[in-house]
Amino acid sequence: MKDILASLVAFCSILPSAVFAQDARLTARPASPEPGAIVRLTLDAPSGVDKVVSVRGALAGEPLHFMQTAAGVWHAIGGIPVDEEGSLVANAILQRASGKTEITRIRFTLPKIPPPVAQPLEVDSAFTRPLDSATLARIAGENARAREVGRRAHERAPMWTASFLKPRNSVITSEFGSGRLFNGQLTTRHLGVDFRGAIGEPVRAANRGVIALVDNFFLAGNVVYIDHGGGVVTSYFHLSKTLVAVGETVKRGQVIGLVGNTGRVTGPHLHWAARYGTNTVNPLDLLSISSSWYSAAIPR
Ligand SMILES: [Zn+2]
């Protein structure tokens, strides 16, 4: 009997692992994301005898951080760039114990980007004058620093153990992606969400994270950037006062600054923005990521 078992084991081990492993499958929600959306990816990869030892992946030039949530199931989030049209592919690369590598993909068909919807705004003419080259250089430098915060957020594991929350409970006065008119001239799309607020009202951290940047920027005024890990960054603009320092770990819901009108704005409000890596995404999409679906392991 022992001999039969031994020869069975020997026989099984020489069969290619693909005989046992079912094909891995990658699915996404939403299935048809808008530009700037955060997508939730699920990888189903039944192990069979050839165990999956690691999973990596990419979407839109950014790494995906797959986390195993059940036997044969991994979750990851990714960002769709705001200026992407046509189609985009996310992939997952599985490494099995035998050394075999499997690649599975999902293709997104993106809607054509509609022309921005104009929202006429009465703006001081100081805002519509062309900017001088020194100011343009300053803005470019500040954008590069913000991108770098996004890039570095991939180096840290997700820090949150609870779902993301809105930084204010007030009315949203401008949605993500809506176009803007400054004195009749169409400017760039609005790459954040505006919350109503009076000067001095509290602004809260959307989730646990490390303060990555605190400064005064030309367009955004007093800013705070939080690195939540897992590629996710949230930022808070036009603050009258910042209450945190770079390197500090903040709690979900902690007051990190006060509403203001610093930077290139017409009145006090909070502009809330988010990135997945270097790509700007709709911060409200963070609210749809349940902590049981994707978060750091809850410490025991
Ligand atoms: Zn805004």
Image (tube, rainbow, N blue to C red):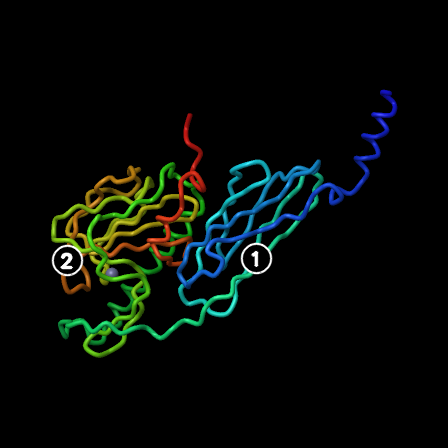
In the rendering, at what x and y percent does residue 122 appear? Answer: 15, 72
In the rendering, at what x and y percent does residue 51 appear? Answer: 66, 37
Q: Is residue 260 left or right of residue 50?
A: left
Dot 2 amino acid type: Pro
In the rendering, at what x and y percent does residue 283 appear? Answer: 33, 54
Task: Count residues near mark 2 (Cα–Cα under 10 Å), then give few for <14, some for 14-19, many for 20+.
Answer: many
Q: Quadrant of ligand 1?
A: bottom left
The residue sitting at the bottom extreme is 184
Q: Which residue is mark 2?
A: 268
Q: Which residue is mark 1?
A: 106
Dot 1 amino acid type: Ile
Q: Is residue 13 left or right of residue 176?
A: right
Q: Is residue 230 left or right of residue 187?
A: right
Q: Is label 2 or label 1 in front?
A: 1
Q: Secondary structure under badge 1? A: strand
**Measuring 30% from the left and 70% from the top, which residue is drawn there?**
188
Q: Is residue 203 left or right of residue 43?
A: left
From the viewer's side, name the closer residue of 90 and 145: 90
